Amino acid sequence: MGRKVKSPESEPCCCHQKRTPRQEREVQQLKNRLSRMIGQLNGIGRMLDENRYCGDILTQVAAVESALQSFGYLILQDHMETCLVEEIGKGNLDVIEEAVELVKKLK
């Protein structure tokens, strides 16, 4: 209990040392999600320029937040299914605490 998370400088987890292998299709799907969010953010900027109703803008803000949250959970799931499993298999249990911190950041 209470094991200290090591800093990336001392003993980084697998994802700080190497790349996470992703299929080209998966990368493209993630990039498509990002592009949609960028489009939504640009749309919010246009809404401000047009002095649109606050409620309409807030609805779009909520949509972007939800999309970004979903994106983060996809990345977290990938991290847990790849890097975390790999490091636990090597006996590195410190990555569990790192994963808990990552989950906290996404809430």
Image: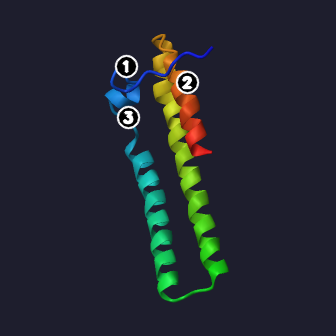
The residue drawn where x is 63% and y is 65% is 62
Q: Nearer the viewer, residue 39 or 98?
A: 98
Q: Residue most toward the top? A: 91
Q: Is residue 16 left or right of residue 30?
A: left
**Disc 2 target residue:** 97
Whether residue 37 is situated above or below residue 52 in the rendered picture: above
Q: CA distance from mark 1 to mark 3?
A: 21 Å
Amino acid carrying mark 3 in the image: Pro
Disc 2 crowd, CA 10 A, few/some/many (<14, 14-19, 20+):
some
First in sequence: mark 2 vs mark 1: 1
> In the image, which disc is placed on residue 21?
3
**Mark 2 vs mark 3, CA separation in Å:** 22 Å
Q: Earlier in the sequence, mark 1 or mark 3?
A: 1
Q: Residue at x 52, y 82 (%)?
A: 47
Q: Mark 3 packing: few (<14 Cα in 10 Å), some, or many (20+)?
A: few
Q: Amino acid at mark 1?
A: Glu
Residue projecting furthest to the right = 55
Q: Secondary structure at mark 3?
A: loop
